[in-house]
Image: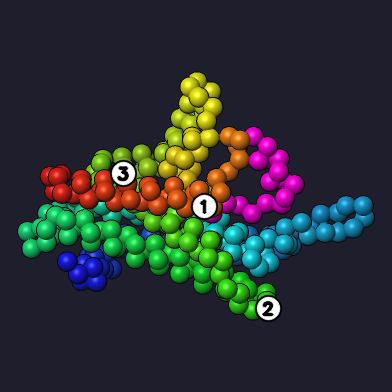
């Protein structure tokens, strides 16, 4: 079982796909556009206080806060574009019977599962590379030079990209029909988990463990940089206090292992 060989097979399968190319273009194009608009709006936004003009958001675009801001912007790309790509990839495999063909042509079911996981890791690495290029590009445009990427931001972004990809793949693997799986995935990341979390909070138990649900953990990997005054108000309640990067990273790693195991078991046992 050579991971590089399996990765090559996946690349040969998806590279010619129009759907894959559209999602790749959407990810790069939308990410770049939103970053450009955010930088333009934030740097030009002014606020007048006591006759003095200030730029309240200008500090968000100064190293290292610019990495945090770009990671937060990228979280939306990860949740909606990468997660949706995960749904479409696996449901199209079932529609085209390519999973069954892979087994017929000599791969074991476990190798098929590993190939998908290796491909997901490669896509998450590519997404992280795009994030780093945009961050460095912004620093060059500002004339501030290239700064070392904060390890926490880069690691958090990668874990989040991989997490949403696998979450989308799981949704597609369970439901199999593209439209239904896509709607179910979007419903979960947009509102379903949040609604269930608050229902449980008010009806069953007020516990901070509710912050360790999958979407909540993945979102906490790329928090929005906020001023200390705002952060202190938000953190006043134990339940509303966001997860630390360490808590989110540990939770994300556990979920990634769980997602990978569930995916592999499903591929091995399911009718392809």
Residue that carries the numbered disc 1 in the rendered image? 246
Residue 44 image point, x, y percent: 74, 62
Magenta span includes 225: yes
Q: Is residue 167 magenta?
A: no
Mark 1, mark 2: which one is toward the viewer?
1
Could you tell me residue 88's position as x and y percent? 30, 52
Near-viewer residue (16 or 93): 93
Mark-to-mark CA distance, 3 and 1: 27 Å
Mark 1 or mark 2, earlier in chain: 2
Against 92, residue 180 (above or below) is above
Residue for point 68% across, 46% down: 231
Q: Position of residue 212 (x, y in %)?
A: 47, 40
Question: In this picture, which residue range is highlighted in magenta?
Answer: 221-237
Q: Earlier in the sequence, mark 3 or mark 1?
A: 3
Q: How is the image coloured?
A: rainbow
Looking at the image, which residue sits at the far right? Answer: 51
Q: Is residue 40 above or below residue 248?
A: below
Q: How many numbered tags mark residues here?
A: 3
The answer to whether the residues at label 2 and label 3 have Cβ atoms under 8 Å apart is no
Name the residue nearer the viewer: 3 or 88.
3
Point 42% across, 43% down: residue: 214
Residue 139's disc is none
Give the structural element (helix, strand or loop) at label 2. loop
Residue 189 lies, with reference to residue 1, above or below; the image says above
In the displayed structure image, the side of residue 20 where residue 111 appears, left or right: left
Q: Quadrant of residue 114?
A: bottom left
Name the residue carrying label 3.
171
Image coordinates for residue 1, horizontal then vertical, percent = 17, 66
Q: CA distance from mark 1 to mark 2?
A: 32 Å
- Work out whether 189 lies above or below 24: above
């Amino acid at each position: 079982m050579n991971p590089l060989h399996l990765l090559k097979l996946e690349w040969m399968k998806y590279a010619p796909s129009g759907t894959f190319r559209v999602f790749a273009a959407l990810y790069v194009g939308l990410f770049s556009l939103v970053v450009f608009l955010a930088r333009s709006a934030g740097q030009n936004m002014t606020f007048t206080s006591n006759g003095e003009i200030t730029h309240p958001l200008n500090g968000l675009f100064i190293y290292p806060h610019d990495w945090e801001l770009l990671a937060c912007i990228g979280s939306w790309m990860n949740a909606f574009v990468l997660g949706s790509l995960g749904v479409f990839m696996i449901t199209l495999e079932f529609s085209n019977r390519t999973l069954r063909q892979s087994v017929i042509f000599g791969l074991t079911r476990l190798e098929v599962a590993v190939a998908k996981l290796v491909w997901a890791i490669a896509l998450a690495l590519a997404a992280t590379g795009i994030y780093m290029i945009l961050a460095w590009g912004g620093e060059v445009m500002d004339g501030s030079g290239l700064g070392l990427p904060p390890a926490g931001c880069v690691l958090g972004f990668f874990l989040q990209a991989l997490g949403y990809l696998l979450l989308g793949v799981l949704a597609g693997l369970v439901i199999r029909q593209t439209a239904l799986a896509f709607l179910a995935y979007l419903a979960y990341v947009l509102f379903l988990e949040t609604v269930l979390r608050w229902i449980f909070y008010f009806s069953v138990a007020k516990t901070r463990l509710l912050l360790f649900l999958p979407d909540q953990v993945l979102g906490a990997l790329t928090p929005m940089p906020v001023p200390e005054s705002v952060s202190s108000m938000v953190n006043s309640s134990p339940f509303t206090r966001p997860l630390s990067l360490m808590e989110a990273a540990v939770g994300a790693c556990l979920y990634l292992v769980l997602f990978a195991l569930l995916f592999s078991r499903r591929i091995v046992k399911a009718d392809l």
